Image (cartoon, rainbow, N blue to C red):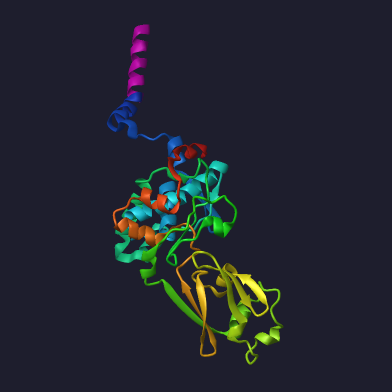
Amino acid sequence: MRRKARELFSLLVIIFLLPYVVTLFMNGAHIKTSSRVKEDYVKVQVGTRVEEIVWEKYLAGVLAKEMAADSELEALKAQAVILRSGFYEKLDHDRKTIFTDDFYSMEELEQEWGEETETCKENLKRAVQETDQMILQYQDQYVMLPYHKLSAGKTRSGQEVFGGESYPYLPARDCPKDLEAKEQLQECVLPYHKVKEKCRKFLTAVENPEETKEGKKATFDDFEIQGTDAAGYVTTVRIGQATCTGEEFREALELPSSHFSFQEQKGKLQITSGGIGHGVGMSQYTANQMAKEGKGYEEILQYFYEGAQLKDGGEIFLKLE
């Protein structure tokens, strides 16, 4: 009787475990545990909600938002490493981080790229997967990794822009190809009083409000560039009796960069800007040109972030719940 009971028990165990054993045999190491699946998701602020989004899709979506998805693959890889480095730093400090960076959903990507959507999706996917878990650090530390769309022919020194000796990995780099870009030079022309009105919010020593209205004598002499850095980006601007930084002026006038000059144009102020962005770190345009020349993402990153090292940051995901 006991023997029959044991045989029956053994049979039930086999019946119960057989589906799992067969599945394990067929799939082997490809089976993911629930904890591993959890590691592949991050929390993202989407409007007023917090959603869990597949990590690779989120990174690819942010990448598409930050750089043209039809860029060269190696340039996209370089940008993917930069973005991942910033995200991993946040996770390293707080495993419950909720990301807020804007990203393209797949639907938005289709609206943006139309017939080229599938090609762009594949580029983004490869850029993320082929740099899987790679991050960029300097002397084993997370550091600021700035980037911009287009320099004015040369990137700016981090130590000159930010001051101090903490940014030796951000050297000034020549980017001659940037000067050939269609978007390199942009112009805007405004009446003098309109320029003053736009700048009033941060200037403390401007004239009385009445003096900025139509009919008052604001002239070209009220505007002067008083200082630039080694790359030609404006550091100080005089407006009347007041001064401001080049970045303040750029933001007030919504200029593409702080590399600009003034010209008089029929009683108005013509502002000619060069490049797009702050000019520090990687120029995406030059990165793309380097990729076209056959350079890999490692060489691109080393050019703009001198002395920084590529590392496997995969263990950061172990901090996710």
129 in relation to 277, above or below? above
What residue is shown at x 33% (from left), y 23% (from top)?
A: 15
**In this rendering, would 173 be left or right of 243?**
left
Task: Tell me if residue 34 is in the magenta stretch.
Answer: no
Q: In which quadrant of the rendered image does the N terminus lie? A: top left
Could you tell me residue 291's position as x and y percent? 32, 56
Query: Which quadrant holds residue 210?
Result: bottom right
97 in relation to 113, above or below? above
Task: Tell me if residue 7 is in the magenta stretch.
Answer: yes
Could you tell me residue 142's position as x and y percent? 52, 45
Q: Nearer the viewer, residue 85 or 318?
A: 85
Q: Which of 231 and 141 is in front in this view?
A: 231
Main secondary structure found in the magenta portion: helix
Residue 68 visible in this rendered orientation of the protein = no
Q: Magenta span covers which residues? A: 1-16
183 in relation to 48, above or below? below
What residue is shown at x 53% (from left), y 44% (from top)?
A: 91
What residue is shown at x 58% (from left), y 85% (from top)?
A: 220
Query: Which quadrant holds residue 194?
Result: bottom right
Q: Among all residues in the image, which is located at the extreme front?
A: 230
169 in relation to 257, above or below? above
Could you tell me residue 55's position as x and y percent? 44, 47
Q: Which of 220 and 132 is in front in this view?
A: 220
Could you tell me residue 206's position as x and y percent? 69, 78
Query: Which quadrant holds residue 314?
Result: top left
